[in-house]
Image: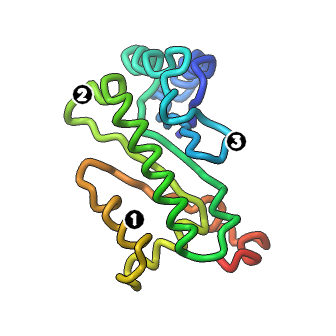
């Protein structure tokens, strides 16, 4: 899978598809507040990106899997509630991007795009969904994850490596 956030990246997908023998699976990178990479939810179609992705799909060089966001803001948090609030904001930003660009992204009614979000603190804090019903953030996050119109995937970033940075954040 590849992350795309600029139409100038799309011509390389034809070379990839030719070499791989299959289209590249892509996510559109969404900036939900970290401002390091990706496009803001309101500007996903900047420079015609989404139309060009549709053209690449029609040409057989790409297959849009969904939207991807990684907000490292959660690493600054010190509680599970803060981490979950960042995760809620990420899901909300991607949901807004889907809704405001549905006419370009969801041309096929049966197609379900993935919203892939998270960072290690957010995914680790999501275990609170099962523990504490009094936590407002846990209830709100649980509601988002149960939304039948959303297909949310939580990714844990570098958590599987469990490097020293992860140990220092008590992940």
Q: Quadrant of residue 169?
A: bottom right
Residue in front for this viewpoint, 152 or 34: 34
Q: Residue 111: x, y in percent? A: 26, 36
Q: Residue 81: x, y in percent? A: 53, 73
Q: Is residue 101 left or right of residue 118?
A: left
Seen at 51% across and 24% down, the residue is 17
Element carrying mark 1: helix
Residue in front for this viewpoint, 58 or 33: 33
Q: Is residue 145 left or right of residue 77?
A: left
Residue at the outermost left position = 110
Q: Which residue is mark 2?
A: 108
Residue in front for this viewpoint, 60 or 127: 127
Q: Earlier in the sequence, mark 1 or mark 2?
A: 2
Q: Which residue is mark 3?
A: 36
Q: Quadrant of residue 99?
A: top left
CA–CA distance between discs 3 and 2?
31 Å
Element carrying mark 2: loop
Seen at 62% across and 68% down, the residue is 160
Q: Earlier in the sequence, mark 3 or mark 1?
A: 3
CA–CA distance between discs 3 and 1?
24 Å
Seen at 31% across and 49% down, the residue is 150
| Vertical relation: 52 (above or below) 77 | above
Labelled pair 3, 1 in contact (Cβ < 8 Å): no
Q: Which mark is residue 141?
A: 1
């Amino acid at each position: 899978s590849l992350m795309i956030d600029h139409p100038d990246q799309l011509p390389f997908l034809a070379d990839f598809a030719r070499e791989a023998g299959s289209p590249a699976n892509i996510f559109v990178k969404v900036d939900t507040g970290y401002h390091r990479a990706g496009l803001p939810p309101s500007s996903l179609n900047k420079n015609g990106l989404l139309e060009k992705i549709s053209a690449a799909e029609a040409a057989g060089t790409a297959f849009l899997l969904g939207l991807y966001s990684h907000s490292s803001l959660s690493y600054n948090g010190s509680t599970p509630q803060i981490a979950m609030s960042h995760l809620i904001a990420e899901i909300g930003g991607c949901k807004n991007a889907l809704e405001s660009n549905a006419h370009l992204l969801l041309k096929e009614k049966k197609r379900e795009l993935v919203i892939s979000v998270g960072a290690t603190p957010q995914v680790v804090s999501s275990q609170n969904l099962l523990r504490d019903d009094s936590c407002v953030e846990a209830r709100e996050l649980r509601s988002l994850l149960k939304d039948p119109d959303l297909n949310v995937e939580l990714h844990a970033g570098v958590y599987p490596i469990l490097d020293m940075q992860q140990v220092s954040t008590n992940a």
